[in-house]
Image: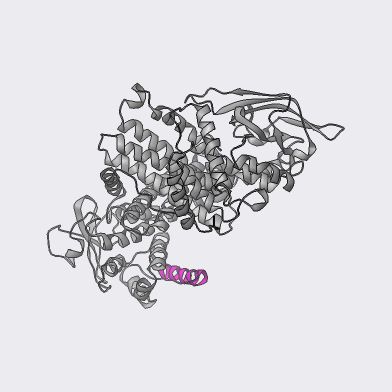
Amino acid sequence: MNDAEVELLTQTLRRTMTGTASGAALDAALAGLGWAELLAEFPAVAIPTVFRLLGETGAHAPVLNDVVLTAAGRPGGGTVRLPYSGGSWVVWERGAAATGRTLDEDLPLRPVPADGPGPVPELLARPDSTAASVPVAAGRRAVGWWLLGTGHAMLGLARTHALDRVQFGRPLAAFQAVRHRLAETLVALEGAEAALTAAGDDLGSLLAKAAAGQAALTAARHCQQVLGGIGFTAEHPLHRHVRRALVLDGLLGSARELTREAGALVRAKGTAPRLVQL
Amino acid sequence: MSALTTAADFRTALRAWLDENDLSPGPDHSFDAQVAQLARVRRALFDAGWMRYGWPREVGGLGGPAVLRAVLGEEVATRGLAEPGIYSMVEVLTPTLVDHARPELAAAMVPLLLSGREQWCQGFSEPGSGSDLASLTTRAAPRDDGTWVVNGQKVWTSLAQYAARCVLLTRTAPGHEGITAFFVDMDTPGITVRPLRTMHGVDEFAEVFFDDVPVPADRMLGRPGDGWRLAMDLLPHERSTCFWHRVAHLYTRLDRLLAETATPDDAALGAAYLALHTVRCRSHATQRRLADGVRLGPETSVDKVLLATAEQQLLETVRDLLPGVLELTETPWRSEYLYAKAATIYGGTAEIQRNIIARRLLDLGRE
């Protein structure tokens, strides 16, 4: 796909995500736009574009299932058990009746027992990345792009607030302490985007997910502070993105867990792999 | 040597050559020895052609894309052939000459630098002008015969005591438009160099005093008032290829830590690795943009913050995971740990970078 086609796709997807109810309706709308074919034929475009936009728009759809299933050579459209932080497992439900009770109640995520029956459990026999490398790597990239989009959504809200809100006779954005928090947020997000863009193999995907989780949590921390009281209310949209960042960070391994895993790997190897080359 | 135009071919051929031609430094780790080693490495790489790739033919180069210089510097850093900070100075000094000097001057001078025959320095910072570089007060005044006369003081001038030439910023009129750059011979009467003692124990920097120093008019870089633009133009060079070199160097230090530590702190090792990987990915993207002909700008402040943060995090991890080592033993780690403290200060402080990001990238308006 060329740049113009990607831009057109992005516009269409953004319109769909903002104009369609999240969950089953958006799942159907994305299917109608050719999501399955896009994922099969252009995964390097499909995953960054769709998942980043889910984050930016605050929408959600159960399409992570399709990424993991497709990467495992299975047909999409179903659900698959996904490893979660702390050795837990979850299923991202599809269907109109699906509801959730996690910290982000909007997401139809359902914790499932580690040893119980579940859809396609053998794909992810072990929660560590190396054993079930193919499905988890693609899924981690997808969730990473989502976290990046969520981080940018928070940064956008905080930036607008900093420019609009006046205290001491000037906008918050005129205060260096506020500016530097927002600058730090952008640095973290830009670093994560570079890691996601470069991610190809298992380790690169693990590191990219870790960087994205860390960046989204950095964004949550700084943006919450910049938004002050209004950002703590339920009427302001910030808390939805904060919840999403927290829940997505744990999905397929938290930044903290993945960072530790990377550390164990380089310690075992005795050298730090240089993953990107000129 | 056949023309090498891709990074992969260049790297393969270069590695084969370096395997055959051992340029490893000797046992003397003094700074004098490091500067001598740098000259030796540059000369050998120049004579064999490697140092000439990625530079224009007009200044003694062999042409080809700039990415070849990044590959060369990565190989030099990875093999520990030269101290990466002073090795990379060529990446800011050469483009400055190529872009701003008279073509004849650039053609005559640049080969002297690339071949290791000379070291050059950059006279920018002053005692009263650190972050606020544009407030510099070193004056250049024209004489009736057309010569300019320089008076003032520079500080934090890397390699000044070894340098044959200096890219010098002076004031010729008020404001940003009143800054003018010269290419000054360091053996001109009236120049005094005094090395600075720093906390990490390496005399890399110096103070430079200018006392009625005459500079010929044809040594002006650009025209009167072009100095600020020259200073801004070199930042993207510093933050693309130099950064790639530095990241490669830091990976060697993480490897060294992995070899030496007995502390199985995977969280700390992983965090140090993640920070390095992140800045490597960012620097890689910057290299690609440069290759695509994109004009680099304020977004390189992001690279700068990521790099400085990663460097300090790595060296703090060294101290944590080699407990007692840098405090109690005479190890190279001691100097490197202390030097990392400067990473958020030199080349524009972390605060200045965040100011730029806030103003130029986030469009937050004025403070």
Give residue B123's quadrant in the image. top right
Task: Say if the magenta span includes residue A63.
Answer: no
| Colour mapping used in the image | one colour
On the picture, is B345 further left or further right than A215?
A: right
Where is residue A118 shown, x and y percent of the image?
16, 65
Q: Hey, which residue is sitting farthest right in the picture?
A: B144
Q: Please name whichever residue, A56 or B228, is drawn nearer the observer in this view of the structure.
A: B228
On the picture, is A186 further left or further right than B194?
A: left
Give residue A138's quadrant in the image. bottom left
- The residue lying at 54 percent from left, 47 percent from top is B48
Q: Please name whichever residue, A228 or B263, is drawn nearer the observer in this view of the structure.
A: B263
The quarter of the rendered structure image containing the N terminus of chain B is bottom right
Q: What secondary structure characterizes most of the magenta part?
A: helix
On the picture, is B167 further left or further right than B26?
A: right
Where is residue B349 shown, x and y percent of the image?
53, 36
Where is residue B190 shown, x and y percent of the image?
73, 24
Q: Is residue A181 visible?
A: no
Q: Please name whichever residue, B73 or A195, is drawn nearer the observer in this view of the structure.
A: B73
Q: Is residue A71 above or below residue A220?
A: below
Task: Say if the magenta span includes residue A6.
Answer: yes
Q: Is residue B336 visible?
A: yes
- The stretch of residues the image draws in magenta is A1-19
- The residue lying at 53 percent from left, 27 percent from top is B32
Q: Please name whichever residue, A259 or A250, is drawn nearer the observer in this view of the structure.
A: A259
